[in-house]
Amino acid sequence: MRRFLYRLPRFKTELPMDLILGDAVILGVCLNLSESGLRGTFSHPVLAGAEGLLTIYQGEQNVQIHARVYSLKGDEARIRFRFDSEQEQQNIREFLKLVTPSSPKSWWR
């Protein structure tokens, strides 16, 4: 029998982003976004396990969060956010509200 695992809602996007890995800045596109991470593509290869500072842009707004490349599937990377504080989690929630204004309010805490 399969076990049900709850997954936070994911939202389709096409937002520019960049990932700072050491001295390198790798440009990318966020394809879907949730409170816990994202799926996207990058202009240069990234390795699973790489950690860095991720910035996602929406017009004049952006959000920065420490992140880890969790896995790779083809040219897409799955990224998990690493929260160091409750404020960082709140920043992601506020950014999601900005980029997904038509989402049901019940999804947001």
Image (spheres, rainbow, N blue to C red):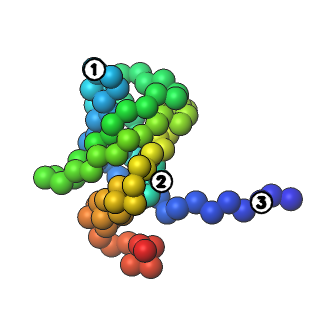
Residues tagged 3 and 2 counted as in contact (Cβ below 8 A): no
Q: Residue at 29%, 46% (x, y): give it.
A: 64
Residues tagged 1 and 2 counted as in contact (Cβ below 8 A): no
The amino acid type found where label 3 is placed reads Arg
- The disc label shown at residue 23, or none: 1
Q: Residue at 49%, 40% (x, y): give it.
A: 78
Does residue 42 lie above or below 55 as drawn?
above
Residue 104 vs residue 84, the one in the foreground: 84
For disc 1, the neighbor class at 10 Å (few under 14, some 14 to 19, many from 20) is: few
Marked residue nearer the N-terminal end (3 or 2): 3
- Check disc 3 and report the residue beneath it: 3
Q: Nearer the viewer, mark 3 or mark 2?
A: 2
Which image quadrant: the C terminus?
bottom left
The amino acid type found where label 2 is placed reads Ser
Q: Is residue 26 left or right of residue 67?
A: left
Count of numbered labels shown in the rendering: 3
The amino acid type found where label 1 is placed reads Asp
| Secondary structure of residue under mark 2 | loop
Q: Rounded to the nearest whole Å, what is the CA distance between mark 3 and mark 2? A: 20 Å
**Can residue 57 be seen?**
yes
Q: State the image coordinates of residue 98 (x, y, percent, origin top left).
A: 26, 64
Q: Is residue 58 left or right of residue 29?
A: left
- Check disc 2 and report the residue beneath it: 36
Marked residue nearer the N-terminal end (1 or 2): 1
